[in-house]
Every structure is written in C-alpha cells, then in structure tokens.
Amino acid sequence: MTKVVNGGSDDAAAAASSRRRKRAKHPLEQFTTIVPPLTISFVTALKGARAQLERASRGKDAYFNDDGFAVGLAFVLAVLRQERAFDSLHWFDSVREHFA
C-alpha cells in the first residue's frame, strides 16, 4: 500500500516494499532441512509396508523394493543444487553412528 503525498507516491514505503521483496527467500531454499524428518517418515512407512507384505505372503516368495524415495530425493537435491548443503548436515554419518 502506498501513501499519496503531494500528488506523488511515498518513496519510503516503496523502498521498504522493495527491500522486503529482495529479502524474501525461495520457498525451497532450505529444502535440505526437511530431508532428515522426511527420511525418518519414509523408513517408518517402508518398515510397515514390508511387515504387511510378509504377513500377506505367508511363506511364499515375495520381493519388496522401493527406491523411488531415494532417487527422487537425489533428483530434487540436484535440481535445487543443494547437494553440498545436504552433505554438510552429515545426516548419513549421524544415522550410521546412531544405529551401529
């Protein structure tokens, strides 16, 4: 909203609005920060699906494979050019250390 002063627009309000737009970040700029909780959620769902398959197969041969999440995650990180930012989280090292 601009204020009219002496027939012209208020330059201070326009400048403030411009500064706010410049500071606004892209919504996916911090995508790497949501990768750990997404991964935990995926692994939880994967374990549940595997258990359900084991109950349904009851001794029959059954194969379970779901690499779509990992491939999709790698793709999104590459497109957003956030591989280094993700690597700086040391997420996989932390998981290995925690569960080893």
Image: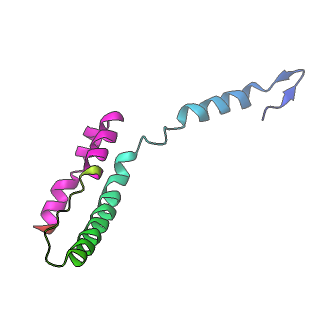
Side (left or right) of 80 relative to 2: left
Side (left or right) of 27 relative to 44: right
Q: Where is the C terminus found, in terms of image quarters? A: bottom left
Residue 94 part of the magenta segment: yes
- Please name the residue shown 27% across and 64% down the image: 43
Residue sitting nearer the eye, 26 or 65: 65
Vertical position of residue 93 compared to residue 19: above or below = below
In percent of width and height, residue 29 lies at 42, 40
Name the residue furthest top.
Answer: 7
Residue 72 part of the magenta segment: yes
The quadrant where residue 84 appears: top left
Magenta residue span = 69-98
Residue sitting nearer the eye, 42 or 27: 42
In percent of width and height, residue 37 lies at 34, 60
The quadrant where residue 86 appears: top left
Vertical position of residue 61 compared to residue 84: above or below = below
Vertical position of residue 59 compared to residue 19: above or below = below
- Please name the residue shown 31% across and 61% down the image: 42
Name the residue furthest front.
Answer: 60
Residue sitting nearer the eye, 5 or 22: 22
In the rendered picture of this protein, how many numbered marks are placed on residues?
Answer: 0
Side (left or right) of 80 relative to 89: right
- Please name the residue shown 13% across and 63% down the image: 97
Vertical position of residue 96 compared to residue 3: above or below = below
In percent of width and height, residue 25 lies at 50, 38
In percent of width and height, residue 24 lies at 54, 37
Q: Where is the N terminus found, in terms of image quarters? A: top right
- Please name the residue shown 25% across and 69% down the image: 47
The quadrant where residue 15 appears: top right
